[in-house]
Image (cartoon, grey):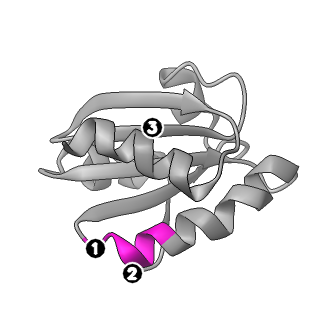
Amino acid sequence: MAVTLIDKDTFQKEVLEDKGVVFIDYYATWCAPCRVTSPIIEELSNEMKNIKFLKVDVDKNPELAQQYSIFSIPTFIIFKDGKLASQFVGAMGKEGFLNEIKKVTD
Protein backbone atom coordinates (compact mmCIF):
# COMPACT_ATOMS: atom_id res chain seq x y z
CA MET A 1 0.00 0.00 0.00
CA ALA A 2 1.51 3.28 -1.06
CA VAL A 3 1.36 6.59 0.78
CA THR A 4 -1.44 8.64 -0.79
CA LEU A 5 -1.13 12.38 -1.39
CA ILE A 6 -4.23 14.27 -0.23
CA ASP A 7 -5.36 17.89 -0.31
CA LYS A 8 -8.04 20.06 1.28
CA ASP A 9 -10.65 18.63 -1.09
CA THR A 10 -10.04 15.00 -0.07
CA PHE A 11 -9.11 15.54 3.60
CA GLN A 12 -12.65 15.20 4.98
CA LYS A 13 -13.33 11.87 3.26
CA GLU A 14 -9.86 10.35 3.69
CA VAL A 15 -9.27 11.41 7.30
CA LEU A 16 -12.25 12.72 9.25
CA GLU A 17 -14.74 10.17 7.94
CA ASP A 18 -12.37 7.20 8.28
CA LYS A 19 -13.19 4.69 11.02
CA GLY A 20 -9.65 3.53 11.60
CA VAL A 21 -6.12 4.80 12.14
CA VAL A 22 -4.81 7.40 9.70
CA PHE A 23 -1.16 8.55 9.73
CA ILE A 24 -0.49 11.88 7.98
CA ASP A 25 2.92 13.20 6.99
CA TYR A 26 2.85 17.01 6.59
CA TYR A 27 5.83 17.84 4.40
CA ALA A 28 7.30 20.14 1.73
CA THR A 29 9.30 19.13 -1.33
CA TRP A 30 12.20 21.44 -0.34
CA CYS A 31 12.46 20.04 3.22
CA ALA A 32 15.56 17.85 3.72
CA PRO A 33 14.31 16.07 6.89
CA CYS A 34 11.05 15.35 5.02
CA ARG A 35 13.02 13.63 2.25
CA VAL A 36 14.84 11.54 4.89
CA THR A 37 11.62 10.34 6.54
CA SER A 38 9.67 9.74 3.32
CA PRO A 39 11.16 6.29 2.57
CA ILE A 40 10.58 5.23 6.19
CA ILE A 41 6.91 6.22 5.97
CA GLU A 42 6.64 4.38 2.65
CA GLU A 43 8.14 1.25 4.25
CA LEU A 44 5.72 1.46 7.18
CA SER A 45 2.78 1.81 4.78
CA ASN A 46 3.81 -1.45 3.13
CA GLU A 47 4.16 -3.26 6.47
CA MET A 48 1.16 -1.89 8.39
CA LYS A 49 -1.85 -2.65 6.20
CA ASN A 50 -4.33 -1.78 8.95
CA ILE A 51 -3.25 1.89 8.94
CA LYS A 52 -3.89 4.42 6.17
CA PHE A 53 -0.77 6.49 5.38
CA LEU A 54 -1.27 9.89 3.77
CA LYS A 55 0.84 12.93 2.87
CA VAL A 56 -0.07 16.64 2.78
CA ASP A 57 2.14 19.14 0.95
CA VAL A 58 2.01 22.20 3.24
CA ASP A 59 3.00 24.57 0.42
CA LYS A 60 0.02 23.49 -1.67
CA ASN A 61 -2.36 23.16 1.30
CA PRO A 62 -1.59 26.00 3.72
CA GLU A 63 -5.12 25.91 5.13
CA LEU A 64 -4.62 22.31 6.33
CA ALA A 65 -1.30 23.26 7.91
CA GLN A 66 -2.90 26.24 9.62
CA GLN A 67 -5.90 24.23 10.79
CA TYR A 68 -3.61 21.89 12.76
CA SER A 69 -1.10 24.57 13.86
CA ILE A 70 1.78 23.16 11.85
CA PHE A 71 4.73 25.53 12.14
CA SER A 72 7.61 23.09 11.59
CA ILE A 73 7.98 20.24 9.15
CA PRO A 74 7.98 17.38 9.00
CA THR A 75 4.97 17.15 11.31
CA PHE A 76 3.08 13.91 11.73
CA ILE A 77 -0.51 13.56 12.89
CA ILE A 78 -2.28 10.33 13.72
CA PHE A 79 -6.07 10.28 13.64
CA LYS A 80 -8.15 7.50 15.13
CA ASP A 81 -11.80 7.19 14.11
CA GLY A 82 -11.73 10.71 12.66
CA LYS A 83 -10.29 12.35 15.80
CA LEU A 84 -6.78 13.71 16.31
CA ALA A 85 -5.01 11.20 18.55
CA SER A 86 -1.35 12.25 18.32
CA GLN A 87 0.77 15.02 16.80
CA PHE A 88 4.56 15.14 16.78
CA VAL A 89 7.30 17.02 14.95
CA GLY A 90 10.67 16.13 13.51
CA ALA A 91 12.51 13.43 11.65
CA MET A 92 13.05 10.13 13.43
CA GLY A 93 13.92 6.56 12.63
CA LYS A 94 11.54 3.70 12.02
CA GLU A 95 11.47 2.68 15.70
CA GLY A 96 10.44 6.19 16.70
CA PHE A 97 7.51 6.12 14.29
CA LEU A 98 6.50 2.66 15.47
CA ASN A 99 6.50 3.87 19.08
CA GLU A 100 4.27 6.84 18.19
CA ILE A 101 1.86 4.60 16.28
CA LYS A 102 1.73 2.08 19.16
CA LYS A 103 0.68 4.86 21.56
CA VAL A 104 -2.49 5.27 19.50
CA THR A 105 -3.17 1.65 18.53
CA ASP A 106 -2.45 -0.16 21.82
For the residues marked 2 and 3, what is the alpha-carbon distance in whole angstroms? 19 Å
Q: Count of labels shown? A: 3
Q: Quadrant of the N terminus?
A: bottom left
The type of residue carrying mark 3 is: Ile
For residue 101, side relative to residue 28 (left or right):
left
For the residues marked 1 and 3, what is the alpha-carbon distance in whole angstroms? 18 Å
Q: Name the residue that disc number 2 marks.
A: 1
Magenta region includes residue 54? no
Horizontal and vertical percent position of residue 95? 53, 53
The type of residue carrying mark 1 is: Lys
The answer to whether residue 31 of the structure is visible from this angle is: no
Of callouts 1 and 3, which one flags the residue occurring earlier in the amino acid sequence?
Answer: 1
Mark 1 or mark 3, which is nearer to you? Answer: 1
Horizontal and vertical percent position of residue 103? 31, 36
Q: Name the residue that disc number 3 marks.
A: 77
Classify residue 72 by image quadrant: top right
> Do the numbered discs 2 and 1 sit on residues whose CB atoms are within 8 Å?
yes
Instruction: Read off the magenta span.
Output: 44-49
Of callouts 2 and 3, which one flags the residue occurring earlier in the amino acid sequence?
Answer: 2
**Up-down: is 103 above or below 44?**
above
Please report the residue visible at 42 percent of the width from the left and 43 percent of the height from the top.
99
For residue 12, side relative to residue 67 (left or right):
left
Q: Secondary structure at mark 1?
A: loop
Residue 72: mark: none
The type of residue carrying mark 2 is: Met
The answer to whether residue 39 of the structure is visible from this angle is: yes
Of callouts 2 and 1, which one flags the residue occurring earlier in the amino acid sequence?
Answer: 2
